[in-house]
Amino acid sequence: MPQNQLVDHLFRHQYGRMVSILTRIFGLKHLETIEDAVQDTFINAIKAWQNGIPDNPEAWLTQAAKNRSLDLFRKLGAEQSRIPKLDSGPSSIALGELFLDNEIADSQLRMIFTACNPALNAQDQIAFSLKTISGFSQKEIAASLLLKEETVKKRLIRARKSIQQSGISFEIPSGKELPGRMNRVLEVLYLLFNEGFHSTQQAFLIREDLCGEAIRLCKMLLEKKYTTTHSAHALFALMCFNTARLKSKLNTQNEVVSLRHQDRSTWDMALIRLGHVHMEHAVETDRFSNYHYEAAIAAEHATATTYEETNWANILHWYELLDQVQPSPFNGLNRAVIYLQLKEFEKSRELLESIEPAQLEQRAYLYYGLWAEYYSKKGEKEKSITAINRALDLVSNEAERTYLIGRREKYASHI
Amino acid sequence: MLVILGKSYADLNLSPEEVQARMGKWFAWTEKMKTQGVYQSGNALTDQIKRVTGPERTVTDRSSTELKELIGGYYLVKARDFDHAVEIAADYPDYDLNGTIEVREIMHYG
């Protein structure tokens, strides 16, 4: 009986591999032709595998990509003298060798660094990464980033154009350039992960896919010596801790479940353990990044067996240190929340007074929401209602609005 | 015979993830026909089309992109009757992509 099950996401991951290898051979200039060619190999696979999937589908697809590259040599080679000759010349690379696992991983890292090249603007970097490295279609990118398909299309076109115009080379930067570029790569992966983790509007599968991709790409960095940095370990740990509790963030009605009410028995203990392993590598340095502190905070939450047992004192400490490496009014806001929990009202008030709400931009509603909570705890009903109304004036997300309206009713019913 | 008609997958802009999901459904359908003992044979066709027409045997190339639908493949099934064959066709996975199955009986002589 032919086996009709493939490893989850095999095609998606294989797509990224094949596009990377072929780009290494033919150059970024031919990216679109390459992407079409790779797409074709999957469609051919459907037809070729009618009577059973080969024992090693991955090898079959890799071989298909290799054959495609020979076709492309003929097609592009005729138009372009720039294309390296297969069998001679100093630029020639033995084709077979490029298809070895180690070289495939290297090609993929090159693609990651290309996607995170500063010549591309930040929004385009994420869309381009999802398309080229993760094999998402425009439609899938639009659904996962909550954008219109047309917007995604524009971003992809702009990204390709920036790559052509700035003549980016398909390489991993070396020497002095590497650390700075590594930072950008980590930042893009961090953003990609957060798109999946923090959105409250998307279907669970899409969010899980985005987080999964961010984790996979970060893992690739950790498989090569020169891209294995302490910060990369810390970011990986952060992703593990957060992904471990992804499933408990929304209830069956798709409503946000606050940390206090999440079902901790659903948290993925294996992922939490993996996070700790990477955390140990991450701290083998005396220079900590924002990822170190964010991972430390996530670890505190992940290891607390109940909400009440959370070590708030530690978390406060991590937030203070985080604010030193990466100052942000949100760190202050988070600390104010914790002080409120700990009933240290004065400290909470001091922090809130030190924050300029305009700096919080679209999330300024959180600031007023927190004031409302503060006044309510202090028994100042009028002031809490005034504050929550300010918050409601500023909030745009529907799920958050519903939450705030619920709070307002609660404050109003307080005597 | 179940004749499969539709747009070519190559022209539908499916993502790798979607192609993989489609493939799973195709295999499940074939598998079901085999388990039920109705499957005889089947083949997928490539997108290359040449038409030979007229007394001059004029040969024209047709590309899948310009065709609204083309024959993507066929299955030969052994059905009790026409209705049974239609029933088998109900499991074809691409109706949501505007695909069509044409059910035709093979003519037997003698």
Image (cartoon, grey):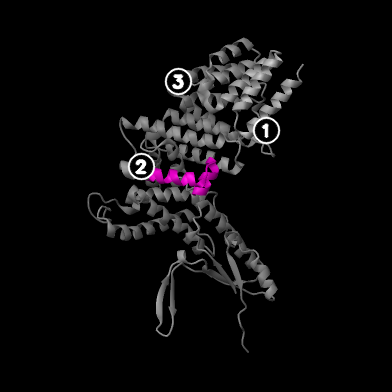
Q: Is residue A341 visible?
A: no
Please state the horizontal and vertical placement of residue A190, each as a whole percent of the image: 48, 33
Please report the bounds of the magenta region as a residue range: A137-160
Please state the horizontal and vertical placement of residue A198, each as a whole percent of the image: 57, 33
Give the alpha-carbon distance from disc 2 to disc 1, as whole Å. Answer: 47 Å
Q: Residue at x 36, y 45 (%)?
A: A161
Viewer-side label of 2, 1 = 2
Instruction: Please give the residue where the numbered disc 2 appears in the rendered image.
Output: A162
Quarter of the image containing the C terminus of chain A?
top right
Q: Which mark is residue A325?
A: 3
Instruction: Please give the residue where the numbered disc 1 appears in the rendered image.
Output: A265
* Amino acid identity at mark 2: Ser
Q: Residue at x 62, y 18 (%)?
A: A371
Give the letter of the chain under mark 2: A
Viewer-side label of 2, 3 = 2
Q: Residue at x 26, y 52 (%)?
A: A82
Nearer the observer, A106 or A158: A158
Nearer the observer, A209 or A103: A209
Give the letter of the chain under mark 1: A
- Mark 3 crowd level (few <14, some 14–19, many ≥20, 10 Å Cα): some
Looking at the image, the residue that sits furthest to the left is A89
A294 left or right of B92 in image: left
Please state the horizontal and vertical placement of residue B42, each as a whole percent of the image: 55, 70
Circles 2 and 1: CB atoms closer than 8 Å: no
* Amino acid identity at mark 1: Ser
* Above or below, comparing residue A202 to residue A27 in the picture: above
* Above or below, comparing residue A61 to residue A402 in the picture: below
Q: Earlier in the sequence, mark 2 or mark 3?
A: 2
Q: Which mark is residue A243?
A: none
